């Protein structure tokens, strides 16, 4: 459902020239799977997801989403994805229902199926009690529910979550993770970006550890823990960073090539 091959995105820097925010990245994500991108801030997670959602064009390599090349068929890609970040962007003067309905119409959903879809989503996400609440009066948890609802209103097969729990309290974050897990259970293909280790352990079927634009390794949490003989994914993460940091720094300086 998502296939990324040798994906690279470079930006120009006045001092350093071309800088690769995403550097030769490859991975695949299947239906009914949550694939985690685990890395610190600045690792390249958001750049990668912006390419997948057609906000950015890759410098090199290829990314296919739902069978469509993100560079050649961006409109088809956008019709098949839902994208959610930690920035809710909720309109103050629209109610929860109006917000979700508005996005449904943007996607061109006909009136009768749109109304049925809204009812289904509000029931599934337990949003009926906030359907008439204005954005201005919503709590953070309410806003996140609305964000999820508008992300899935057109029933896309692929969902992209870019650090959706960042800055949330533990109860709201838990509700978001439960909603994402439920979407996986109905067959959605999900890519989930985070820097929070416990979210990866709790939620992700497979994970790619990314640092300075490169994927250091990929596998299930248990596979990676076993492979590196560590007690948890956090220790795996720090071991990989420690081992690869000299090579990545050398490549960034233009003095060598990482392996």
Image (tube, rainbow, N blue to C red):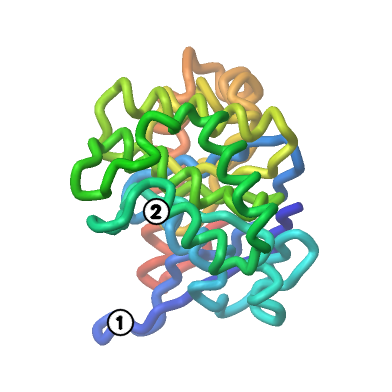
Residue 229, percent from left and from top: 55, 17
Residue position marked by numbered label 1 in the rendering: 13
Q: Residue at x 50, y 17 (%)?
A: 230
**Is residue 169 toward the left or the right of residue 220 in the image?**
left
**For the residues marked 2 and 1, what is the alpha-carbon distance in whole angstroms?**
17 Å
Residue 129, percent from left and from top: 38, 29
Mark 2 nearby-residue class (10 Å; few <14, some 14–19, many ≥20):
many
Pointer 2 with pointer 1, Cβ within 8 A: no
Residue 98, percent from left and from top: 41, 54
Q: Residue at x 33, y 56 (%)?
A: 42
Residue position marked by numbered label 2 in the rendering: 43
Observer able to see residue 203: yes
The one nearer the camera, 85 or 207, is 85
Which element is circle 2 on? loop
Residue 226, percent from left and from top: 62, 18
Q: Residue at x 76, y 69 (%)?
A: 68
Observer able to see residue 27: no
Answer with the quarter of the image where residue 75 lies.
bottom right
Sequence-wise, the earlier of marks 2 and 1 is: 1
Answer with the quarter of the image where residue 243 lies.
top left
**Is residue 143 toward the left or the right of residue 32 in the image?**
left
């Amino acid at each position: 459902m998502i296939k990324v091959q040798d994906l690279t995105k470079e930006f120009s820097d006045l001092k350093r020239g071309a800088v690769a925010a995403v550097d030769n990245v490859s991975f695949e994500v299947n239906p009914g799977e949550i694939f985690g991108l685990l890395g610190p801030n600045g690792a390249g997670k958001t750049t990668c997801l912006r390419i997948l959602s057609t906000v950015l064009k890759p410098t090199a390599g290829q990314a296919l989403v739902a069978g469509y090349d993100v560079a050649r068929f961006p409109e088809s890609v956008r019709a098949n994805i839902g994208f959610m970040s930690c920035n809710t962007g909720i309109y103050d003067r629209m109610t929860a229902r109006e917000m979700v309905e508005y996005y449904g119409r943007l996607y061109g959903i006909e009136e009768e199926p749109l109304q049925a879809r809204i009812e289904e989503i509000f029931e599934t996400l337990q949003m009926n009690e906030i359907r008439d609440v204005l954005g201005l009066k919503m709590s953070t948890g309410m806003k996140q529910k609305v964000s999820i609802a508008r992300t899935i209103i057109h029933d896309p097969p692929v969902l992209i979550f870019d650090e959706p729990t960042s800055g949330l309290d533990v109860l709201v974050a838990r509700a978001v993770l439960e909603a994402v897990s439920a979407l996986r259970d109905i067959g959605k293909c999900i890519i989930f970006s985070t820097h929070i280790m416990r979210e990866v352990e709790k939620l992700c079927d497979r994970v790619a550890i990314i640092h300075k634009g490169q994927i250091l390794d990929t596998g299930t949490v248990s596979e990676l823990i076993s492979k590196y003989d560590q007690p948890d994914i956090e220790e795996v993460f720090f071991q990989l960073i420690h081992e690869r940091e000299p090579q990545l720094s050398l490549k960034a300086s233009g003095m060598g090539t990482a392996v």
